[in-house]
Image (cartoon, rainbow, N blue to C red):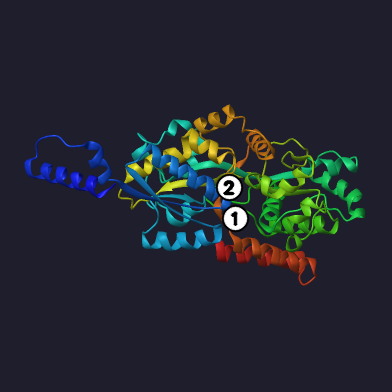
Amino acid sequence: MNKFRRGIAAVLSAAMLISSVGCADTDIISQEKQVEISFSWWGNDARNKYTIAAVEEFEELHPDIKVECKYSEWSGYETRNKVWMISGTESDVMQINYGWLDTYSPDGNGYLDINTVSDIVDLSNYDAEQLNYGLKNSKLNAIPIAMNAQTVYINQTLYNRYSLDVPTTWDDFFTAAEKMSEDGIYPLSASSKAMWMYLITYAEQKQGKPFLTDDGGLNFGAADLAVMIEFYQKLIDAKVAPQVEYYERNNLASEVYAGSVAWVSDASNYFGEAVKKGRNIVPAQYTTFDGNNVGEGWYAKPATMYAISKNTAHPRESAMLLDFLLNSKEMAVLQGIEKGIPLSKSAQSALERKGMLEGLQYEASQCMESADLGKLDPIIETGGMIDDFFSASNDVIYEKATLNQASADLYQKLLKDYF
């Protein structure tokens, strides 16, 4: 706005204050009262680029709202978010991790209850089960953008080379190892977290009980943990999978690994190079003992979520941005399926009209939806607990402890430090 225009606005505003009557240029006044809100997220350069473009479109649609963008890579964002939440200086609208609901809002009061702005945020785009992931103490603290689950991906081109079908059972991987290991190829691979969750799945199926109780307590005893350790050692000894310490994602493209356990949202990151080389990468059924794909022992969680600060001075404007990020066709097309297949029905419709619901990540998402997966408790992803498990496993693998000793010690440590 130039000086002359600002001068007119000031005079008109003063006139209104003095006389309390008459008319004014509402456009000028609205610009003088422009609301500024902040929005924070994490991501790589590609995510930052399309998110900034989306914010610019939002500002064009709502010239009375200015959005300050705050973003960084995951590690930096996680650290900053902790400081922001402790000091009450978090952004008005923010991308959050699913586990942060327990960390920052155990009683439901850590974030704004989105139900209070449901006249702006179109919640009809979501099923009750989907929204339930964001509920804390009956308050809607966050809305999931997309769902995520650990999934088995298989290089079918490589499996075909050995005349092997895509594995569906635990035994199938050992059969594959008998053929592939001669050439130094592992039928399966996984990072530490993915392997940890894969082993929980195996033990839940074998032992016939969940890892956690309904109220989040530890339901596995020392004997159940021993099943996990023993099976992990069996995978390594049979050369089904490498030890997690030696896992390297690049080995998927070089075909040292013929498959991997990874999140649905990581499908493109893990297998993009292999797909470019013309390899047929497919999501396998969720591994079970009989190959029935019911999803027993497998878990789903929100890939990521959006929340509004409880401290925001502008809840309605923040809600307008939140609705745009979740439900608008503009954001849907810019984002595509980079964060996973959007849960919003209107966002899905926009992608479908553009022919953007396709590819490996979409196939993995469809596989996830076809199975009856449990709701992942964030405690299962606790880094320290995962490290403790593999430390105990290595004690057994390198004969520093017996299986019974290691599993008993691990059980006591888990109870003491995490439950």
Quadrant in the picture for the C terminus: bottom right
Q: Residue at x 62, y 29 (%)?
A: 355
For label 2, the crowd category at 10 Å Cα-Cα, with few meaning under 14, some 14 to 19 and many 20 or more, is some
Query: Taking 301 as reference, is 126 left or right?
Result: left
Residues under numbered marks 1 and 2 in contact, where contact means CB atoms less than 8 Å apart: yes
Q: Residue furthest top?
A: 353
Is the residue 68 above or below the residue 367 in the image? Answer: below
Crowdedness near tag 1: few (<14), some (14–19) or many (≥20) residues, C-alpha within 10 Å: some
- Side (left or right) of 392 relative to 383: right
Q: Position of residue 342 (x, y in %)?
A: 55, 37
Which residue is denoted by mark 1 in the rendering? 381
Viewer-side residue, 21 vs 199: 21
- Asked whether 78 or 287 is in front, the reply is 78
In this view of the protein, which residue sits in the foreground, 298 or 411? 298
x, y percent for residue 368: 65, 38
Q: Residue at x 55, y 58 (%)?
A: 73
Residue indicated by mark 2 = 376
Instruction: Tell me, yes or no, if residue 419 can be seen here.
Output: no
SS state under label 2: loop
Q: Amino acid at mark 1?
A: Glu
Given the current orientation, which residue lies at the most extreme left position? Answer: 19
Query: Can you name the residue that lies furthest to the bottom here?
Result: 400
Task: Work out whether mark 1 precedes mark 2 in sequence or the reverse, and give the earlier one.
Answer: 2
Instruction: Give the side of residue 127 with respect to residue 276, left or right.
Output: left
Q: Position of residue 41 (x, y in %)?
A: 49, 52
Q: Decide: is 289 above or below 352.
A: below
Q: Residue 341 location, x and y as percent?
A: 59, 38
Element carrying mark 1: helix
Identified by mark 2, the residue type is Leu
Cα–Cα span, label 1 and label 2: 9 Å
